[in-house]
Image (tube, helix red, strand yellow):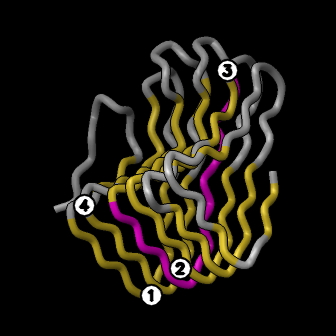
Amino acid sequence: LRSETAILQPQNDAFIQSFSFGGTGGDINLVAPIINLGGNAFTLFIGAFGPGQGGDVNIDADSFQSDVSSIGAVLAAPGNGGQAGSVNINSDSIFLDEVQLISAVVEPGALGNSGNVNITTDSLVAINGSLIGSLTAGNGNAGNVTVTADTISLSGFRVLSQPLSEPTRIS
């Protein structure tokens, strides 16, 4: 899925999804000067329920804002052996309020690695329990979380890059 528009603003429990029950999952690419995922917009890429690789979530915007949302690339099935996709965000300014940006292997017993979470921005603001993470509850490695920014402002924010049983905290 590729969406290119002047302003992208799904609302009221909106979903943008790509599924694979075997084989390689498709990517989701959102490109717009302004992307606002608000009003409980829920944007999720579920990579693979069967054997195969998950796709990536790629967001490219001048301004990216999201509140009460989940954005993820997930590998879900036990015994899968693939890899979850990555979440990549490139934006001049990013504002996250109660947002989860996650690449994950979610089911215990799933085989494979989580993808990476990469954020490149001039300004990142994350508040109210926002979470950026690459994690796994299965048998595999969590990916890397990389944030490249000129300014970062965090309040009530978490970064995870470990198995779910060992949460990380920022002090």
Residue drawn at x 59%, y 77% is 91
* Mark 4 or 2: the one toward you: 4
Task: Name the magenta segment's main secondary structure.
Answer: strand
How busy is the neighbourhood of tag 4: few (under 14 within 10 Å), some, or many (20 plus)? some
Q: In which quarter of the image is residue 89?
A: bottom right
Please name whichever residue, 82 or 88, is drawn nearer the observer in this view of the structure. 88
Kindly identify which residue carries mark 2: 121
CA separation in Å, label 1 and label 2: 7 Å
Q: Which numbered tag is attached to residue 128? A: 4
165 is within the stretch colored magenta: no
Question: Disc 1 marks which amino acid?
Answer: Asp
Callout 1 touching callout 3 (CB < 8 Å): no
Up-down relation of residue 67 to residue 111 (above or below): below
Image coords of residue 107 (percent x, y): 49, 19
CA separation in Å, label 2 and label 3: 32 Å
Q: Is mark 3 on a helix, strand or loop?
A: loop
Up-down relation of residue 69 to residue 67 (above or below): above
Residue drawn at x 27%, y 47% is 168
Badge 3 or badge 4: first in the primary sequence: 3
Question: Disc 4 marks which amino acid?
Answer: Asn
Q: What element carries label 1?
A: strand
Badge 1 or badge 2: first in the primary sequence: 2
Image coords of residue 142 (percent x, y): 49, 39
Q: What stretch is highlighted in magenta?
A: 82-97
CA separation in Å, label 1 and label 3: 38 Å
Callout 2 touching callout 3 (CB < 8 Å): no
Q: Which numbered tag is attached to residue 49? A: 3
Callout 4 touching callout 2 (CB < 8 Å): no
Q: Which numbered tag is attached to residue 150? A: 1
